[in-house]
Amino acid sequence: MKTLSRIYNVIIFGLLYFPIIMVIVFSFNSARYTPMEWKDFSLQWYEKLFQNEEILNALSVTLQVALISTLAATVIGTLAAIGIHAMNRKLRRVMLTINNFPMVNPEVVSGVAFMLLFVALAAVLPVFKPGFFTLCIAHVTFCTPYVVLQIMPKLRQTDGRLYEAALDLGCTPLQAFFKVTIPEILPGILTGALMAFTMSLDDFAISYFTAGSSAQTLSVTIYSMVKRPVTPEIYALSTLLFGTVFVLLLLANIGQVRDISRRSKRARR
Amino acid sequence: MKDVITLKDIAVSFDGETILDGLDLSIHDGEFVTLLGPSGCGKTTTLRIIGGFITPDRGDVFFGDQRVNNVPPHKRQVNTIFQRYALFPHLNVYENVAFGMRVQKKKKAEIAETVEKMLALVNLKGFEKRAVSTLSGGQQQRVAIARALANNPKVLLLDEPLAALDLKLRKDMQVELKNIQKSLGITFVYVTHDQEEALSMSDTVVVMDGGRIQQIGTPTDIYNEPQNAFVADFIGESNILDGVMREDYKVEFFGKEFRCVDFGFEKDEPVDVVVRPEDIDIVEPEKGDLIGRVTNITFKGVHYEIIVDVKGFKWMIQTTDFHAVDSVIGIMIDPQEIQVMKKSEYSGLYGDYSSFSEEFDGLADPEAENGAAQ
Ligand SMILES: Nc1ncnc2c1ncn2[C@@H]1O[C@H](COP(=O)(O)OP(=O)(O)OP(=O)(O)O)[C@@H](O)[C@H]1O
Ligand SMILES: [Mg+2]
């Protein structure tokens, strides 16, 4: 039974990771064209990658969008979480459902919805013409729920009396917020920000519909490159993207595990 | 003496439920005032009104002559020691104590000096760098005291600060707190549901129940002259009997007239009569004012506690002599040991030991056990 379940696990993970592993392996292959055939180990596709204007441009757009949307989503998400936390139970549940919806909504639908919205707005306000700005707005929107979701449990664990204790010791409400509430929920804010950054890097569908031609993200660029004859350059790019997201998620998880063990240690006293 | 805090006709309700109902209270400068009452009677709520965390629905709060209903907590010259300490877990002991002074932008040297003084005061020298999560309950308690005192408050509000500590530590801390209060001359408003703690530490005890003040007085007043059956029962043990005031200094119960020291009642007014278990003399049956049969005896160390059936009413009597179950004894009560009270909503609810069983003792203090488990 045990071996059976182990075999099952190996098969599942194999199926999940096999294509990615193939992409990674072949990004180091020196042969040029499909069908795939291993020749020599080489880094030439990585070199080519970093000489490709289009890709470098997309990389810079992706990073800028990710940074801006992470920053904005973290601030908005933190404030939203605190607001939701202060609501009564019924309203809180409603708000959390509204918050969670974008995360389960099919991304294509969100993407199309954003596109329609921006097209409609652009008719009145030219800033909403698809481009860098709309890309940022869309990313902030779908990143924020992840931040809220990371911070809510932290707020629930925080003793409400701490905030009152700060007021009692002479803090204005704003000082108490920065000196006590923020440090208490900081682990949640950091993992939330990391999640937001990852989601932003990761996104394809919504970016595809909101970016327009002036500001393309990496994933959109990869997609458009696939339409032309595929070069292993794309493998190299995909490998880098995968590696970055993988490391970020790993960091977020490690942070969470550490925080949990610290909490339980504190609770045991 | 000058009043530092005055509460006038305070009323508070949560979700349509009345929590405080017409509270009037004056607190003198330098006084040790204790709010005493069962769980849920509104003690914490009263403190939170003084601290500024709750605005009353009705009534006024004065600090000195100044009405402070709308003054936010951070502008009030009081500091609170919260029911569960509420130390800042992300700061070490030093920073917790320094917190208030940092907010006030005090000079570094002054902060260091005050923190050192405060930690010495609460016997925590050498703990500066420790994380608060690594401290024992008693140590956290002391940090909370030091943190509040470092702000140099005029009034310190303490919400059951010792509830989570074990008995021995609690006794030690009671003495320490009392010493701190005396040496610094600060007004303490202290909340507890432990009557012994209230009696031994306070200048003034405020007995509360159901969101109302039942009695305000010195510990001896509260104990010797309870104003209604609730106070008599909540503070110590009491036998509470139905009686009729025949005339001044004469009260009748169990069909027998007793001399007493109370006066000023209507003629033939129904009253509650309190007799403390330790104030009753046991004599030969033929010499007693009342005669009863012993139904239970419990050894309590210093004395025995016996339950005596007198015409169906069960008395509790404390005596140093052994009396076997089923033996018949006489009861004698001196006039000054009889306390006559007006009838109240609590009449008939307390003071009869017919349901007496030893298990009750175990249930007496559930809050303290909860606290200790934290
Ligand atoms: N924020 C609140 N919302 C609703 N009800 C509340 C709130 N705060 C207190 N109460 C209710 O008010 C009543 C009095 O509460 P309070 O905390 O003042 O009691 P307490 O005398 O301090 O009791 P304890 O000894 O258990 O601490 C309780 O019935 C409690 O449930
Ligand atoms: Mg309380």
Image (tube, coloured by chain):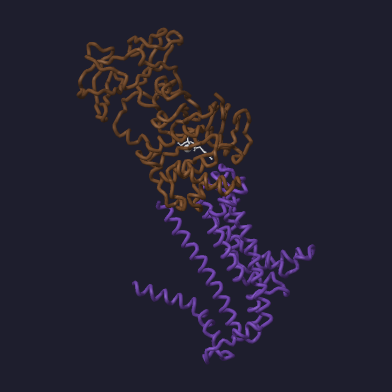
Query: Which residue is more in the foreground, B371 or A153?
Result: B371
Indicate whether A250 appears above or below B69.
below
The x, y position of residue A6, in whole percent, is 38, 74
Indicate whether B370 appears above or below B321.
below
Quadrant into which the N terminus of chain A falls: bottom left
Indicate whether B331 appears above or below B301.
above
Q: How many marks?
A: 0
Whether residue B8 is visible, yes or no, is: yes
Instruction: Residue at 44% x, 34% y: name it.
Output: B179
The x, y position of residue B110, in whole percent, is 56, 46
In this rendering, position of residue A28 left or right of residue A5: right
The hue used for chain B is brown
Quadrant housing residue A245: bottom right
The x, y position of residue A253, in whole percent, is 49, 65
Indicate whether A196 appears above or below B275.
below
Query: Which residue is more in the foreground, B306 or B311?
Result: B306
Whether residue A226 is visible, yes or no, is: no
Instruction: Residue at 58% x, 79% y: name it.
Output: A238
Query: Which residue is more in the foreground, A222 or B105?
Result: B105
The x, y position of residue A212, in whole percent, is 72, 72
In this rendering, position of residue A28 left or right of residue B345: right
Q: Which chain is purple?
A: A
Query: Which residue is more in the foreground, B346 or A15?
Result: B346
